[in-house]
Image: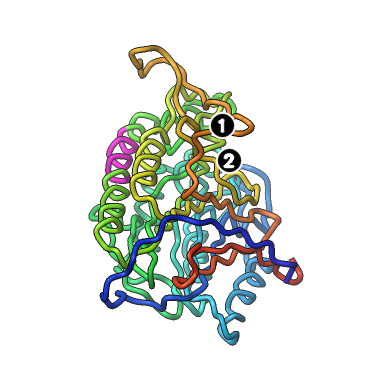
Amino acid sequence: MMRQTMIRYAATMFAATAITFAQGPNKFDFAVIGDAPYGPVTGTPPNRVQVYPALSYERLIADINSTMTAEQKVHLVIHVGDIKEGNSRCDDNVYTQNRNYLNTFLMPAIFVPGDNEWTDCHRITNGAFDPLARLAFLRTTFYPTNQTLGVTKLTVTRQSGYPENSRWRYGPVLFVTLNMPGSNNGYQNANSDTGVPNPYRAVMDAEYATRNAANLAWLNSAFDVAAADATIKGVVIAIQANPFERFLEGGQGYTISGYEGFISTLRTRTVSYNKPVILAHGDTHYYRIDRPMTGTYPACTGAVPPNPTNPCTAVAVPASPTDRIHNFLRLEVFAQNDVHWVKISVNQSDPDLFSLSPQRVPGN
């Protein structure tokens, strides 16, 4: 393992009541991975396909599984989406093979959908699939019951109609997953590739509207649960998209951010919760741990009063903002050719609660 760079943050802690924790210990580790496996691939678009075995990904799985013999084993694994590269086909075997991979983790494994496995499958390079049909197949493949993947199962609560949105309690932490992928959350996804119109644009926009409302309701309900229970000391949220740097991408034809409602709700609830909140995501393939959220970033600027037809852009982050939200921490996972993982340690007796460290996989 590389020398671990520990990043810790403090937050207001509340006295615990004499309530027994729903499941899990008060001190444990969990792993976060994503944007893998991205290869190997063969062929050229639209016949470029992911092939297996994915040896670097298998080494990553073996490395995490090896912790089961350690004193401080990994209790959970969260994959934040993108189980293939963005320019290969969305064929059925990609989903079934990656489900099988996730089931080789010795501990419970939780998977969050990414854009490469559904919102972008309409692209010609991805096989010109119906994205909503891919989402339906993804749901039946990865979320058939209220049990997680992995050799050891964990029971989770799933949102009605959106089984990929899950919630579970482990020790003093409440975990929440949301189907919030890249490509602007699937909204205003105009082109199939190089200027070819997306034939599914209208149905995708309609799907976005209902799913986004469900996501916000699920996020709010999670914070309601956490706020009502003094024994919950922190919240971990897992999504695929990077809603900060990709709040509203230029050159994509987007005029409204598909993440605006999420960021606004997350900001409000994090501030009022006043305990540690971690957002784990992938998407932009740049490993980082930081505190990007402020009272104004990211945000939408435009006409006053707001006009949804006007373009909006992310507000630049000042070098030293005075409105930084300090109980919020963002983790972006290793990705693509950096097939490694991040360990998050939870210790209720530590007033900081969370500590994060990168884990290098030998041979990758």
**Residue drawn at (30%, 33%) of the image:** 206
What secondary structure is the stretch in magenta mostly built from?
Answer: helix
Label 2 Cα crowd, 10 Å radius (few <14 / some 14-19 / many 20+) = many
Q: Nearer the viewer, residue 12 or 148?
A: 12
Give the labeled residue for mark 2.
125
Residue sitting at the far top: 304
Image quadrant of residue 70?
bottom right
Q: Residue at x 47, y 58 (%)?
A: 92
Quarter that holds the N terminus: bottom right
Measured from the top left, where is residue 218 in percent x and y? 29, 50
Determine which of the numbered discs, if any, sits on residue 141 in the image.
none
Q: Nearer the viewer, residue 231 or 55?
A: 231
Q: Amino acid at mark 2?
A: Thr
Q: Is residue 183 visible?
A: no
Magenta stretch encompasses residue 212:
yes
Any part of residue 122 in sight: yes
Q: Position of residue 256 (x, y in %)?
A: 42, 25
The residue positioned 35% from the left and 15% from the top of the image is 307
Residue at 70% x, 55% y is: 337
The residue segment tinted magenta is: 206-215
